[in-house]
Image (cartoon, rainbow, N blue to C red):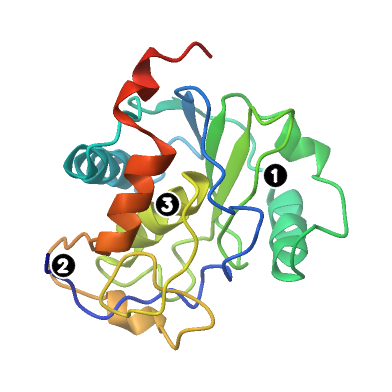
Amino acid sequence: MKRLGAALALALGLAAAPAFGQVPWTFVPSIMVVSAPDDARLPLVAEAIEHWNRQLAEAGAGLRLPAPQWQALPVPEAALQQMSRTMLQGDPPPQPIPPELQSLPGNLVIVLSQGDFVSFATGFFAGRSKRVVGIRGTSVPPLNLPNVAPNLIAHEIGHALGLGHNVDPSLLMCGRPAPCRPPDYRSDTLRMFGLSDAEMQLLSRLYPPQFGARPP
């Protein structure tokens, strides 16, 4: 099955690591977005989640992500930068999860920062009940280019679902060590990138059709 897409820029993403390691959620996670009240990326998070639900449905997976909730909380910028540095050092993290991230509400927490760091998705913590996605600021290239932010958000949510990187620059989950570059995200119209056949098959294994019937 052919997947459409242009070259994807994910130098801002993280290298595939056992922290993602094809470890799925065992229940439907609540999704909380933490940001400033006027953050223009709030609708992009909803679009990224809708994109994942379309991919999950096409894969025959049992999981559907719920609509995100939102809270205007102080964004823990220093903790996000610390976590980004920790993730880049490899798995397992040499430093503990910052308490400012552990205390955020929700199971899958998407934090929209204005800081400059490498966007990331953590592995599970808090007894496999929480993952945090940190998204860098829009004032820092390439997130100020059209079409970059929604795909980067979707890419990091993919890690939070248990997917790692691939090496195909035409697909959503392309990332290090592949030579994907941020300017390749750019498009004057919204374009959400797809998955490989292998990733679709993996989703169906991680979240089989009976997944929704499992107790949390």
Q: Residues within 10 Å of mark 1 (few under 14, many from 20)?
A: some
Question: Which mark, residue 30?
Answer: none
Judging by the rendered image, the residue that carries numbered circle 1 is 76
Say what amino acid the circle numbered 2 marks.
Answer: Arg
Mark earlier in primary sequence (1, 3): 1
Instruction: State how many labels appear.
Output: 3
SS class, disc 2: loop
Front residue of 211 and 13: 211
Mark earlier in primary sequence (2, 1): 2
Measuring 35% from the left and 30% from the top, which residue is drawn there? 65
Say what amino acid the circle numbered 3 marks.
Answer: Gly
Asked if the residues shown at circle 1 and circle 3 are in contact, with their CB atoms under 8 angstroms apart, the answer is no
User: From the viewer's perspective, is the residue at label 1 or at label 3 nearer?
Assistant: 3
Asked if the residues shown at circle 2 and circle 1 are in contact, with their CB atoms under 8 angstroms apart, the answer is no
SS class, disc 3: helix
User: From the viewer's perspective, is the residue at label 3 or at label 2 nearer?
Assistant: 2
Q: Residues within 10 Å of mark 3 (few under 14, many from 20)?
A: many
Q: Position of residue 126 (x, y in %)?
A: 74, 30
Q: CA distance from mark 2 to mark 1?
A: 37 Å
Q: Is residue 52 visible?
A: yes
Question: Which mark, residue 158?
Answer: 3
Is 180 placed above or below 124 here? below
Q: Position of residue 114 (x, y in %)?
A: 55, 56
Say what amino acid the circle numbered 1 marks.
Answer: Pro
Measuring 33% from the left and 26% from the top, which residue is drawn there? 67
Question: Which mark, residue 3?
Answer: 2
> Is residue 130 left or right of 212 when viewed as pictured?
right
Q: Quadrant for residue 43, please give it.
A: top left
